[in-house]
Structures are given as structure tokens and as C-alpha cells.
Amino acid sequence: MTGSNDDHRSAVQGDDLIGNYPGRYWHPVAEGKIFCDLCPRACVMAEGDRGFCFVRQNVGGEMVLTTYGRSTGFCVDPIEKKPLNHFYPGTSVLSFGTAGCNLGCQFCQNWSISKSREIEQLSEIAMPEDIAQAALRLECKSVAFTYNDPVIWAEYAIDAAKACHEVGIKAVAVTAGYITPAARTEFYSVIDAANVDLKAFTSQFYKRVCLSEIEPVLDTLKWLKHETDVWFEITNLVIPDENDGADEIERMCDWILNNLGTDVPIHFTAFHPDFRMDKRPPTPPGTLARAREQALKAGLKFVYVGNVNDVKRQSTYCPSCKELLIKRDWYELGTYKLKGNSCGKCGEVIAGVFGDVKGDWGRRRQPVSIERVSKSI
């Protein structure tokens, strides 16, 4: 069922809508079971069952999203931390997530949120209008749905994005791109920018390490490029002895070039030991540098490294005249030589969404209480 929430509110009513919201993207099957149409995992749930993501549940024969209006906390970040380097550089973004995930990544670096089975009971209450007003009062350019994948709380993310748009705030999704064609049109219709995490470039990695499939992710990337106006960038977390082989990096870059073109930025980011890969060594900076050089050699124009301090490889250069356009020291912007969306030296158009001037948020990370922000006015 993909229609309005008003069509199927019988399972929950009134104040119970906070944390127990009528879900979309499902259909009934035999004996009171329901089939989830939201992501390729295709969970079938009997009465009371939850999906793999943990936050979608069969209640009275209907789909319920159990984390609507619940957040694990809010923080104002630099937009480059998402990472998005070509979307209003230097501006601030109000970031938040909920609980659960529809992937099973052994290396998850937000596992305390994405793998939680209790945190939804402890989360801050924030309805879509509260989030939009908080972003406005905090003078954020955008709101980011992040920390865990917003696909699994699509109804909440969509409503929050719509509320943000009503007050001139942009909506950003940080996602693994693991969503069905049936659900993605509505979800991305309200998203202005996205960072899509391409975990690796082999089916074996996705199956063994992420308990998922790569093909739906690649399909989402192609669809975003050719069927939408969403600005998106790609992140690849480079894990030693897992997905860091030169051959794999080359094949991934060639696929991006042939299917998405030269302008989509890619971020090669360093792995840090965590969750079920806590014994694995961190990614050597040289591995990231090599991956970046491979991508540039393949013909990709905008290639970055992340989770390491590397000013040269975090900065943006004109692909035509090689002028330094945006200097980045971690998330702090220095030199800024863009004029609108063009190189200030040679006039080359730079792919992305840029303001007239750079933002001045810097590298600050500011935790926020939505309730306190609401009471401050």
C-alpha cells in the first residue's frame, strides 16, 4: 500500500501516532501476514513481527513505523561532514537519525544507533514541524537524515522534508541506496541532495559483510542520475583487505564513469576499527591516496579522501585549469574561488549546487535539544 497515511490509520490513533505511525509501502499476504515493499530485503511479517530493520512492525495486520517522531538526538554539523562537498559548501546542517537499519554491515560505525533494540524508547520527541522550525531558528541551510538509513523511516523523513521546504530549508539524505523502485520515487521527490554509500564493488562483499545485495544500490544510483534532479555524491569506505584492491577500485570507477558520468563526486574514506570489525587495522592514508589517483586517472573529475587530515586531497580543483577552488582543512573552508557555480579563473562550470558565497559554519559540531530550541522563542 503506497497511498496516503489517511487511508490506513485504523491500527493506531491519536497520541499513539508518535512512535507508532501508519506505514506505507506494504501489502497484505495470507493469514494476516504483511509484505514490506520498502526495501529489497522484502520482509514478510506475521502479527507482532518486526522486519530486519526492527522499526517496521505488523500491528493488527497493518504496517506500523515505530520510530515516527523519535530521534536519537540532533546536532548541527558542517555539510562537508555528510560528506557533501558540492552542496552549499561551508553551510550548517541540522543532523538527526532514529534507530535500526535495513543492512547488516559488520563494520558499522554508527552501530549503537543502527543496531539498537532499545534506543527508540529513549529518543527525543521531534515532529516534522518542530525539526523545520529548529533548523530555521538555528540558521541551518539544510536538515540531514543520517546516522542510520532514512529509507527505513521514510514516512518520517518525507514529512520532515516537506515541513522543511515550507520554511526554505533543504533536505539531505545520507543513505545506502537500498530501496525499491516502488518506494524511491516518493522518497526522493522531497530530497534535495544525497550521499549514497557504495559499500564495495563486489556482490560477495555485500552478501557476506552487509547481508544485502549490490544490484539494487547500483540501480538506485543510475536512477538518481538519469531520472531525478537530486544532487548526489558517493562515499566508499575503504577497508583493508576487504574492498581496497586496486582491481576493485578500478572497476568501480569505470562503472561510475560509464553509468553516471564524470561529474559525480566520490569520497574514499578511511575505515576505523568498530563493531564486528574492531580487530581490523585502520585504512592507511596511502591507500586512500592511491584510490583517489586511480579515480582521477579513470576520468572522474571530483575525487576526495575522508576521515583523515589531508588538505590537498580534501580540496576542490577546477578540472580544466587545475586552479584551487575550495581549500578544506578537515571541515574548515579557506580559499574559495568559485563565482556562483563556475571557476573564478577560467569560467569552467563546476557540477554541484552552490550559493553566491561560501558558508562560514566551520568545523563546529553543536549538539541541540529540539525542545530547548522550541522554548527559546
Image: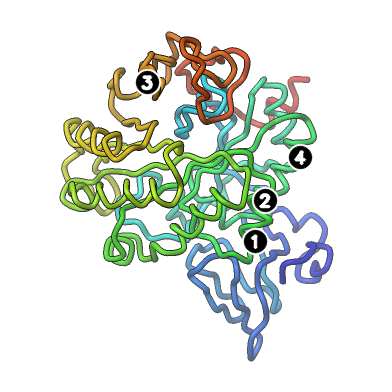
Q: Horizontal and vertical percent for residue 253?
A: 32, 46
Q: Which mark is on residue 163?
A: 4
Q: Nearer the viewer, residue 54 or 176?
A: 176
Q: Nearer the viewer, residue 373 or 153?
A: 153
Q: Horizontal and vertical percent for residue 45?
A: 57, 78
Q: Quadrant of the C terminus?
A: top right
What amino acid does circle 3 point to?
Ser
Q: Which mark is on residue 65?
A: 1
* Disc 1 packing (10 Å; few <14; some 14–19; many ≥20): many
CA gap, disc 1 and disc 4:
19 Å
CA gap, disc 2 and disc 4:
11 Å
Q: What residue did someone put label 2 on?
A: 156
Q: What residue did someone put label 3 on?
A: 315
* Residue that appears at 31% across and 43% down: 237
Answer whether labels 3 and 1 touch (C-beta < 8 Å): no
* Disc 3 packing (10 Å; few <14; some 14–19; many ≥20): many
CA gap, disc 2 and disc 3:
34 Å
Answer whether labels 2 and 1 touch (C-beta < 8 Å): yes
Vertically, is 268 above or below 322? below
What amino acid does circle 1 point to?
Leu
Q: Nearer the viewer, residue 234 or 211?
A: 234
Nearer the N terminus, badge 2 or badge 1? 1
